[in-house]
Amino acid sequence: MHFGRPKVSGNGRHSSFAEEALEEAIRCCKNGAALDQVLLTFGSKLSGSDDYTFLFRELGNRGEWLAAMRCFEFAVGRERRRNEQGKLASSMISILGRSGKVDLAEKVFENAVSDGYGNTVYAYSALISAYAKSGYCNEAIRVFGTMKDSGLKPNLVTYNALIDACGKGGADFKRASEFFDEMLRNGVQPDRITFNSLLAVCSGAGLWETARGLFNEMVYRGIDQDIYTYNTFLDAACNGGQVDVAFDIMSEMHAKNILPNQVTYSTVIRGCAKAGRLDRALSLFNEMKCAGITLDRVSYNTLLAIYASLGKFEEALNVSKEMESMGIKKDVVTYNALLDGFGKQGMYTKVKQLFAEMKAENLSPNLLTYSTLISVYLKGGLYQDTVEVYKEFKKQGLKADVVFYSKLIDALCKKGLVEYSSFLLNEMTKEGIQPNVVTYNSIINAFGESASIECGSDNVTQIVSTISQSKWEYTEEDNIVKIFEQLAAQKSASGKKTNAERQDLLCVLGVFHKMHELQIKPNVVTFSAILNACSRCSSFDEASLLLEELRLFDNQVYGVAHGLLMGQREGVWTQALSLFNEVKQMDSSTASAFYNALTDMLWHFDQKQGAQLVVLEGKRSEVWENTWSTSCLDLHLMSSGAACAMVHAWLLSIRSIVFEGHELPKMLSILTGWGKHSKVTGDGALKRAIEGLLTSIGAPFQVAKCNIGRFISTGAVVAAWLRESGTLEVLVLQDDRSHLGGTRFGQISSLQPLTL
């Protein structure tokens, strides 16, 4: 966020002798004895703490830490005034902290306290700031407590450092806000740095609304915003899925004559990429170049990742070449993006080539590199390669984290290997790594996608505690290696299938119970996964049982889903609209997934009028971008139930155009995709569902010869069909589950055209 901030280079109060001493010190900083001689030579000429601070600060900026420490120790030894010694110590701690040398900063602080000149607000604040800059939040808070116990009163610098520690150390906003409230109670007024740090905490936690409130409070207090404020605010907006708001913020920056920099563009570009708006992201790169802003390493890596995710590998490799022509060598982040992009496209030979090239460049693979490779190989069924990469990862001594395990679990789940992923879940908890909501979402999603995956135990809690220990004995040998080796030995293992739908349901309930037990709060993705699982239930009673679990976490989601499922739309629609407004604040992919899951569940249980209402609300809220036009309906991003409901709504909309006397476009298209991830090309589930629907209602669409996932018809033929007397009856959706009762909502069944 603070890219481009100039390094602190002193306050200008040092003497010319200090600059001469620095030149001599730089020449001989590798030679301790020679450096001591320089210090002795200039000792009588250097004027106190200002000169010495300048000297060891400049050496520190050049990475000469041992020389800087030698100068500091020399200065403290010559200085007899306690307050001046304290100033030297505080400055040295700050310099070390800015450069991530926390161990040296601790040493300076401890020596200063034991020698009687370090028990000052400034020394404590400097150490807290050093911890903050390295992300050591708990250590910073511990030092803060010790400081207050020592009878010292925190100042603005202290509180700013604490709040900064909360942001960099991953603490929640509640902790940071408590320190903010404390500083206000103690009469310490916040400044721009305070708010910048608070915004950074919000950004990391995805608290967009809180960030907006803080920004407004800055304005109310008359605190000017700078480029760092806006960059952090933009990051909060993008992390909160508010990409359109981010563009408004950029416009406001221009109005205030605060010019966007590399970080500004990189932040918004990353936000666009995360929201799936890749074309907009690419246009921002062009805008960035037109503005004369040179792309940095982060910008190039983001651009490369976008092209790789789009499967535009020639463009991605061209970006890589352009980076090198600008003197920017590929780093680990670059390679990670390429490995992920090529891996998603199933180009495993290229993945192996890139990994070898990376190591040939003497770049050490990091945790993300290994988790990406293992995930890619697992999804591709290359289990022997998975074993080799995992063993190399262990050999490097890297420590797996929750993200690493979650990626592995997700990869196994996507292969239908839920039993294996459940064992991994047990392994990570044995290692003391707490699963997060993403981990559980992967497993719930896997159950939702297949209602017949065998569970390892009849006991619902066993799914999240252990998998049959008769398969893997607990020995010193890594159990994860055993999983991968077993998969390699029986490559046909793809998740044993049975007809144990009831047992499958119990597994989902078990995962939900474990989340509740560990107080892991589900998110919208969790709810979408549960709704997907409902759609796979064989009976209405089982779906109701599953929905009951929502009461444990969110009564609003439960009320809307269950009410719509029961056909009670008039009573729950106001509540539903409130929920939909909250969902709209999410990024587009998360929001569309929720709408899809809810619509699919309603469609599955024949609440088709309710499904159409949800689809129309999603259309009105622009959840599905670029989905609907008069000439084309693009269903690529939609699930089958939502797509079927959308087809009905689209055709009714076109019918209203015809009856108003307007001509339809010459060619009409319905795009479904052609199932490139299916075992049989052109046999995607969405295509089959739409083809069956069009046939059942007699719609005159045929598969296009040039695109087997596209249904086409001429406007004249469709208009003639829409004028037929029986067409309206087949287009207007009705609820087939008449025994559920409920009052019909809206005017869908009327002869009036839909207002879209």
Image (tube, helix red, strand yellow):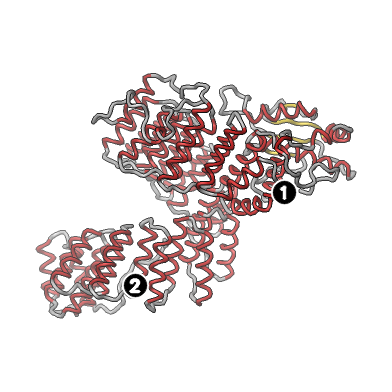
Q: Nearer the viewer, residue 128 or 58?
A: 128
Q: Position of residue 564 (x, y in %)?
A: 66, 43
Depicted 213 relative to depicted 546: above or below: below
Separation of marks 1 and 2 at Cα, in angstroms? 56 Å
Residue 562 vs residue 698: left or right? left
Identify which residue, 685 or 663, lies in the foreground.
685
In the depicted structure, whether residue 669 falls above or below residue 573: above
Q: Residue at x 55, y 70 (%)?
A: 257
Within 10 angstroms of label 1, few (less than 14), some, or many (20 or more) residues?
A: some
Residue 278 visible in the picture: no
Judge left or right: residue 132 versus residue 602: left
Res 705 → quadrant: top right
Q: Quadrant of the N terminus?
A: bottom left
Vertical position of residue 482 compared to residue 748: above or below = above
Provide the secondary structure element on which disc 2 rests: helix
Q: Position of residue 26 (x, y in %)?
A: 20, 64
Name the kind of residue labelled 1 in the image: Glu
The number of callouts visible is: 2
Which residue is label 2 attached to? 157
Q: State which quadrant residue 399 falls in.
A: top left
**Residue 745 drawn at (x, y percent):** 75, 46
Q: Along the line of sight, which residue is nearer the eye, 194 or 534?
A: 534
The answer to whether residue 46 is above or below residue 713 is below
Crowding at label 2, few (<14), some or many (≥20) Cα neighbours within 10 Å?
some
Mark seen at residue 696: none
Question: Where is mark 1, residue-wise?
Answer: 570
